[in-house]
Structures are given as structure tokens and as C-alpha cells.
């Protein structure tokens, strides 16, 4: 186990683009609706106009936005493409927030419960287990523990991991996450969670238990996310 943090972080304009992609998919803006003017949107997001414009250009390239000369930028459609953070369901209490992550540790595990969740019959009986801190607008809001099959990478180091694990799966393991199933409960946080989030020992907080399926219909990831309800909330919207 190591406490070094991953170096492969997403550029800010990609983070902003993913946030807007997620907001569009969640229905904050509907097809045909005009986005706020760039100066207002950049101020709301806390970024330079140049950074915002790079993010908007990428979303336009992906087919989500349409720029109309002299009129503004409009939502073109809700994308069916694979956004990096399309399944990230935490937001600040006031709404939104740019997601980022720091990897706290990486180790080999053989948790029988997780093997059952992944429905694997692999002989190795080994898993990669990652602990991470999650941030919204650079504010620590949650920690998570994530497992995936050791067979995807027999050798793995923190420097190999991308800040976005879903992007890492897509680029290195040749699959992507196409759907997830979440179960939410409230339990006493483990000691490492309480310490990382700065909570009182044995404090009861929400926990999200997730199974994630690949585009090939296989459960490829199991995770537990503990979040601080005084800082963020879980959301899911359908339109």
C-alpha cells in the first residue's frame, strides 16, 4: 500500500466540459435551451473564459452544443456518448460542482464479498483495491473504495492510474462502463473513512454501494462510496 497520489489528472477544460456534459444529461438544460452568456457561465464555474471556450468547443465537437452566430450557444441534444462522469451522482448542496479525485492507496485484495458481487469464477481470486478521496470544486466531500479484476492488469502502479478510472478502463482495458446499479444506506463509517473526512468516530453517514457493468454486459467494478451529507448530496434525475 502507498499514500502517493496519482499524477494523471484531467486538464481543467476537460473537467469543465465533463461537468457541463453531466448537467446536460441530468436535464439542467434541455434541447433547444440557450446556455448563459460565456462571461456569466465562466464566473459561475470559477474559470477563465478561455478555459470555458475550450470546454464548449469540445462539447460542440461531440454534438451536444450548437453555436449560433450573434445568438449564443444552445443545447443540441442529450448525448448518448460515453461521458467520463456521466455516472457520478454526487453534487454540492447548492448543486453542481467540478469532480476531481486523489488516489490514496492501491493494493491487491481477495475480498470474498466483492468476488460474489463481480460474479467472477477466475482461479486467481485476486482483485485490485483502490481507495480515493473525491472532491467537488476542490472541496473534499467523499471517499471511495473500488475493486476490479486483477487479471486486467497483473502489474499496476499508482502512476499508471488516471484520475478518471472509467477513462482508464476505456483506454487500457478495452471496455467502458455502460450502466450502474446503486444501493444507498446509512451506516457507521469505518475508521479510515472517518479520519479521511474529518468526522467523529462511529458517525453514521450515507454509503453508496455500486455495481458497474461494461459494454459487454459484465460486472467489471464494485465500489463503496461514503459521503459527507453536510457537504454534498446524491442525485439522480430522469426526463
Image (cartoon, helix red, strand yellow):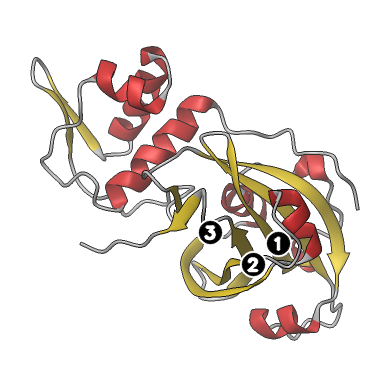
CA gap, disc 3 and disc 2 = 19 Å
CA gap, disc 1 and disc 2 = 5 Å
Q: Residue at x 49, y 67 (%)?
A: 215
Q: Can you give x and y, in whole percent of width and height, for residue 114 in the image? A: 72, 78
Q: Can you give x and y, in whole percent of width and height, for residue 222 in the image? A: 64, 70
User: Which disc number belongs to residue 223?
Assistant: none
Q: Is residue 210 left or right of residue 45?
A: right
Mark 3 or 1: in front is 1
Q: How busy is the neighbourhood of tag 2: few (under 14 within 10 Å), some, or many (20 plus)?
A: some
**Rendered image quadrant of residue 109:** bottom right
Placement of 221 over or under 172, stated as above or below: below
User: Which disc number belongs to residue 224?
Assistant: 2
Q: Are marks 1 and 2 in contact (CB under 8 Å)?
A: yes
- Secondary structure state at the residue bearing disc 2: strand
Residue matched to label 1: 145
Is any part of residue 130 visible from this angle?
A: no
Q: How busy is the neighbourhood of tag 3: few (under 14 within 10 Å), some, or many (20 plus)?
A: many
Residue matched to label 3: 176
Amino acid at each position: 500500500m502507498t499514500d502517493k497520489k496519482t499524477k494523471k489528472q484531467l486538464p481543467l477544460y476537460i473537467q469543465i466540459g465533463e461537468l457541463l456534459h453531466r448537467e446536460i444529461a441530468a436535464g439542467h438544460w434541455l434541447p433547444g435551451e440557450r446556455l448563459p452568456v460565456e462571461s456569466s457561465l465562466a464566473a459561475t464555474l470559477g474559470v477563465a473564459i478561455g478555459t470555458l471556450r475550450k470546454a464548449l468547443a469540445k462539447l460542440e465537437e461531440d454534438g451536444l452544443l450548437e453555436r449560433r452566430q450573434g445568438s449564443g450557444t444552445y443545447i443540441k441534444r442529450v448525448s448518448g456518448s460515453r461521458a467520463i462522469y456521466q455516472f457520478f451522482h454526487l453534487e454540492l448542496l447548492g448543486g453542481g460542482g467540478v469532480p476531481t479525485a486523489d488516489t490514496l492507496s492501491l493494493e491487491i485484495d481477495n475480498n470474498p464479498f466483492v468476488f460474489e458481487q463481480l460474479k467472477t469464477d477466475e482461479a486467481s481470486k485476486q482483485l485490485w483495491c483502490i481507495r480515493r478521496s473525491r472532491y467537488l470544486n476542490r472541496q473534499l466531500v467523499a471517499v471511495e473504495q473500488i475493486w476490479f479484476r486483477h487479471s486486467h492488469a497483473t502489474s499496476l502502479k499508482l502512476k499508471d492510474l488516471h484520475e478518471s478510472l472509467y477513462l482508464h478502463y476505456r483506454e487500457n482495458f478495452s471496455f467502458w462502463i455502460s450502466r450502474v446499479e446503486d444501493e444507498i444506506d446509512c451506516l457507521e463509517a469505518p475508521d479510515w473513512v472517518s479520519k479521511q473526512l474529518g468526522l467523529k468516530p462511529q458517525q453514521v453517514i450515507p454509503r453508496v454501494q455500486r455495481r458497474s457493468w461494461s459494454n459487454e454486459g459484465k460486472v467489471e467494478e464494485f465500489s463503496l462510496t461514503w459521503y459527507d451529507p453536510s457537504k454534498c448530496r446524491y442525485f439522480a434525475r430522469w426526463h
